[in-house]
Amino acid sequence: MTEGTPRKTSLYDRHIAAKARMVPFAGWEMPIQYTGIVEEHQAVRTAAGLFDVSHMGELEMKGEQAGAVVDYLVTNDTSKLVDGQAMYTACCNERGTILDDLIVYRAASDRWLIVCNASNHGKIAAHFEKSAQGRCEFADRSDETALVALQGPKAFDILDKAGSDASKLRELKSFHFRDAIIGNVRCTAARTGYTGEDGVEIFLPWHEAPRLWDLLMELGAPLGLKPAGLGARDTLRLEARLSLYGNEIDETTHPLEAGLGWVVKLDKGTFVGKKALAAIKANPLPRKLVGFEVTGRGIARHGYPLRDLDGKEVGICTSGSPGPTVGKNIGLGYLPTVMSEVGTKFLVDCRGKNVEAVVVKTPFYKRG
Amino acid sequence: MEFPSELKYTKDHEWAKVDGNRVTVGITAFAVEQLGDITLVNLDVKVGDQLAAGKAFGTIESVKTLSDLYAPIDGKVVELNKALDGSPELVNEDPYGKAWMVVIEATDAGGFDKLLDQKSYADHVKASAH
């Protein structure tokens, strides 16, 4: 946990002006909501939302060996990336459990950017810095880098209004990025996100973020753009079944049971955690992360026990909330593999009250 | 934010409308604003149940969080608002009206003295909103 006064992003004044409710989050004072989580959630699904995610960490690795060092630290195969391409990955320890989930960006063969969670920033920065020693240059760019996410079906219509270069961002392929000019703000735009919607995440100098924010809000408001807080970000990512560090994944879980086997490439060269993950993979998984729907009257929450129909505790809920778009109370949690089949009924212990739930197919929401 | 002057309040942000020994209970506009979009109201009592002041009679859940509902006074549950089962959004729309939660028949009128009046409650809200 981070001690002391929470830090403010360069968009703090914008959040206050928009009447956001600010909450401490991973050492930062961040907007949890502006007008309401459901309204912001729906704006992102039907029009667009603008998120300040400047609290996230941005690390840079430079030098001829930077790519090899990065690849050694993560589970996915970053050697497959070309310049201007990014990749989601886990970053594990020697036990194969998860230190963080990251997006790795290859700017050039000798320049890589790593985006980590704010809650893991110190740990991951130290891990990468140590591994870089004597092999490549490490720089923590977090203090000078703001990050703004523009997400939703109208995201590119909004960018169309922001100049000729911005209007071409719709040609950017998924998980690709490039330098861009939005309005007259120089930035780097990546076609990535954490909402289940199309859109971009925009990196830019710390003090330029308010200018970009104002511009996008002005151009976007007529199209339904709304500022969206961490609350909506959480319900959006849950419907899209995207893991949240500290909930679905942490240092007690490994990528294989978390449904992240697709980012573990045991056929690539050596990497931290490879041996442990290969051993885990050689045996049947005792438990798996599943998506579920609460069919009884209740809302599952992080940390609630999951029980079989006899009432025996068999698992744990990692995330849960009403899904504003799917219109159901949904959740993610770990269940024994034998209970992980779609259609399996079980109980969520909602503070002493056992409420019926059923394993369902995920994602809960997939954009059309 | 509105705190009607004819109501009494608790520090836990319930309101109480006292009518003889019948006390109607709900949650305040401040509580509603803190919770956000209300998605579930669970009244875990039935008509006839005895309640003690400060004891939970149910829970209210928003998208983000869950909060207990506390009885403002000692007494017996005489009515429950069943409309909240299917329409929890009433709490956002009309916290002092359609979103009443329970009616309690007070057993000890002395308990009313412990409730806050509008001004004390408004001060309490100001203090808790730092």
Image (tube, coloured by chain):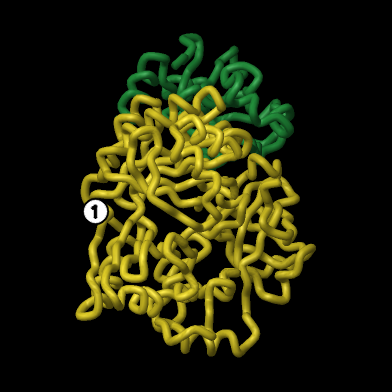
Q: Is residue B40 left or right of residue A185?
A: right
Instruction: Relative to A171, say whether A222 is above or below.
Output: above
Q: Secondary structure at mark 1?
A: loop
In this image, A58 relative to B94: left or right? left
Q: Residue at x 24, y 75 (%)?
A: A136
The residue lying at 44 percent from left, 33 percent from top is: A163
Task: Say which of A114 and B3 sits in front.
Answer: A114
Which chain does the green colour mark? B
In what quadrant of the picture does the N terminus of chain B appear?
top left
For image coordinates 67% across by 47% down, the residue present is A367
Q: Total label count?
A: 1
The residue wearing badge 1 is A3
Q: Which amino acid is tagged 1?
A: Glu
Q: Tell me if residue A123 can be seen.
A: no
* Circle 1 crowding by C-alpha within 10 Å: few under 14, some 14–19, many from 20: few
Residue A194 at x, y percent in the picture: 52, 51
Q: Chain of mark 1?
A: A
Q: Residue furthest top?
A: B6
Image spot of residue A242 (x, y percent): 56, 57
- Name the residue furthest front: A164
The x and y percentages for residue A149 are 45, 44
The answer to whether any part of residue A73 appears in the image is yes
The chain shown in yellow is which?
Answer: A
